Amino acid sequence: MAETNGASNDLKAHEGTYEGFLSLMKIGTIACVVAAALVVYLIAN
């Protein structure tokens, strides 16, 4: 079984890391959409 000692501290660190990951994913998704739109625009012209 997993140890539960210090689980609350690990949870706080996990939440902070996960929030950073989600922010990075949002920015990355927006950047990919903008890059794809730029490529489509350049190919169309």
Image (cartoon, rainbow, N blue to C red):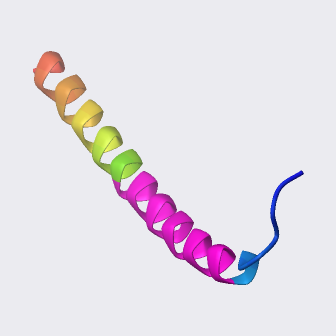
Q: Main secondary structure of the magenta part?
A: helix
Figure quadrant of residue 3? bottom right
Position above or below: 38 against 13:
above
Q: Quadrant of the C terminus?
A: top left
Does 37 appear above or below 15?
above
| Residue 38 % position (x, y) | 18, 35
Left or right of 32 on screen, residue 21: right
For the residue pair 43 and 5, the one nearer the viewer reads as 5
Q: Residue at x 28, y 47 (%)?
A: 31
Residue in front for this viewpoint, 28 or 1: 1
Tell me the magenta residue range.
Answer: 9-27
Q: Position of residue 34 (x, y in %)?
A: 27, 44
Relative to 30, is 3 on the left or the right?
right
Q: Nearer the viewer, residue 4 or 22?
A: 4
Residue 17 located left or right of residue 42: right
Residue 23 on the magenta span:
yes
